[in-house]
């Protein structure tokens, strides 16, 4: 492993991802396998003036044991101390770094009802924390590094060591860490994303018509005051940060009740270790009214039936077909990477920051403006080489947005 690249990567996350400020506390959530890298991030954060770095270690295998053997009733509980942990740090303006590197199949044999129950109580218990992050009140960043269990899933045909090396390589490329000056490379990348955002934001489309030869034929209405975001985001105090690294998308929210037609998936969706593949979803007035899946139908059904909002969409994201992660042609089994390889939609919750003044609205106001709410936010990919997107302007004009899978402006 190239230590110089590791240093560059850690520095990139602290400086560009979180933009850590002097005197700020950093909370790092990382699998124990990633301890070495997490410590490197901590060192970097201290060098940038962090007040304190707090490690919250995760252990996949203990988690699996819990789901297999713990008392059934604990899946309806959420520990007070953990709630306090998240809330107290969030209220004190901490930065949150999360290393996502779990075995994609860790929980595949676990009763999905247990997972849903636990997800429901945790969403409720730390709602304030989640809302703060979703509306950019705290800076946060999710990034990934290889673990053996993840790497061997992505590269099953080589030795363990080789798979880890290959995954590091893919991650360094996607993160532009292989470039001489990754920070500069990200500045350029951010500017490119800004161009796409400006085109979409000045066009103020009323709706998007999306088609390809797979059969996708979907019209997505965009709410008044929608904002396309991408690359970096800003806290109310004006601190710039990048919540997902890598990121190749520009995205906004669909109007909750304004989605009609059918969309076909183009990559498998990994939900808690269960794959849903070759699926289609049909919408009427925003609601999912039908779906099919060659693989994982029951899992898709569980996602859709989680709560009221999980029958609606919360995100439409555009990613060029020739983006670097797409070109790598690797299936990562990790949403952070796979969603940045393809245009995607998300079933469930929308980001309030995608609506003008959305951060300051109550739930009722958000609902009135067509902002979907749910405890789910599940991204699935629909981008293809021949994807065509037409934007319909407020006065009914048609403007090409995507042609042959890429932006056409
Ligand atoms: Zn997205
Ligand atoms: Zn998403």
Image: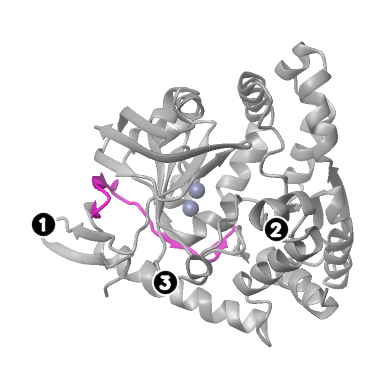
Task: Say which quarter of the image contains residue 236.
Answer: bottom right
Image location (x, y in percent) of residue 172: 68, 72
Q: Residue at x 83, y 66 (%)?
A: 45
Pointer 3 with pointer 2, Cβ within 8 A: no
Mark 2–mark 1 CB contact (< 8 Å): no
Left or right: 385, with 346 as reference point: left
Asked if residue 227 lies in the magenta stretch, the reply is yes
Residue 156 within the segment the image draws in magenta: no
Image coordinates for residue 56, horizontal then vertical, percent: 85, 45
Using the image, determine if residue 320 lies above or below residue 108: below
- First-in-chain label (1 vs 3): 3
The residue shown at (78%, 31%) is 64
Q: Which residue is mark 3?
A: 322
Whether residue 292 is visible: yes
| Tag of residue 6 | none
Report whether 402 appears left or right of 124: left
Residue closest to the far front? 157
User: Which residue lies under the disc numbered 1?
Assistant: 395
Q: Is residue 154 left or right of residue 330?
A: right
Residue 79, visible in the rendered structure: no
């Amino acid at each position: 492993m190239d230590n110089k690249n590791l240093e560059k990567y850690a520095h990139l996350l602290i400086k560009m991802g979180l933009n850590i400020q002097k005197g700020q506390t950093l909370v790092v959530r990382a699998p124990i396998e990633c301890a070495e890298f997490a410590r490197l991030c901590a060192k970097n954060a201290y060098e940038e003036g962090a007040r304190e770095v707090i490690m919250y270690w995760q252990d996949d295998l203990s988690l699996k044991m819990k789901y297999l053997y713990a008392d059934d009733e604990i899946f309806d509980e959420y520990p007070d101390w953990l709630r306090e942990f998240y809330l107290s740090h969030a209220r004190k303006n901490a930065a949150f770094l999360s290393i996502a590197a779990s075995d994609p199949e860790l929980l595949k044999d676990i009763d999905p009802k247990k997972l849903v129950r636990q997800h429901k109580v945790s969403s409720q218990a730390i709602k304030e924390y989640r809302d703060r992050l979703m509306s950019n009140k705290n800076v946060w960043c999710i990034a990934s590094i290889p673990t053996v269990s993840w790497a061997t899933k992505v590269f099953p045909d080589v030795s363990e060591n080789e798979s880890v090396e290959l995954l590091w390589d893919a991650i360094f490329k996607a993160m532009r860490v292989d470039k001489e000056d990754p920070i500069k490379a990200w500045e350029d990348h951010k500017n490119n994303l800004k161009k796409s955002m400006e085109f979409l934001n000045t066009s103020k489309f009323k709706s998007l018509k999306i088609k390809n030869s797979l059969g996708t034929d979907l019209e997505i209405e965009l709410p008044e005051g929608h904002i396309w975001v991408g690359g970096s985001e800003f806290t109310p105090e004006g601190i710039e940060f990048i919540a997902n690294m890598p990121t190749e998308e520009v995205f906004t929210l669909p109007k909750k009740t304004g989605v009609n037609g059918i969309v076909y998936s183009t990559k498998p969706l990994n939900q808690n270790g269960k794959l849903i593949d070759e699926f289609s979803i049909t919408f009427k007035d925003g609601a999912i009214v039908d779906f099919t899946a060659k693989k994982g139908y029951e899992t898709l059904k569980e996602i859709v039936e989680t709560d009221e909002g999980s029958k609606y969409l919360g995100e439409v994201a555009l990613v060029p077909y020739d983006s670097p992660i797409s070109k790598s042609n690797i299936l990562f089994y990790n949403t952070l990477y796979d969603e940045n390889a393809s245009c995607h939609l998300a079933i469930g919750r929308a980001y309030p920051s995608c609506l003008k003044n959305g951060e300051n609205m109550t739930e009722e106001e958000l609902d009135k403006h067509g902002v979907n709410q749910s405890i789910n936010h599940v991204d699935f990919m629909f981008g293809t080489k021949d994807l065509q997107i037409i934007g319909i302007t407020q006065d009914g004009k048609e403007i090409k947005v995507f042609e042959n899978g890429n932006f056409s402006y």
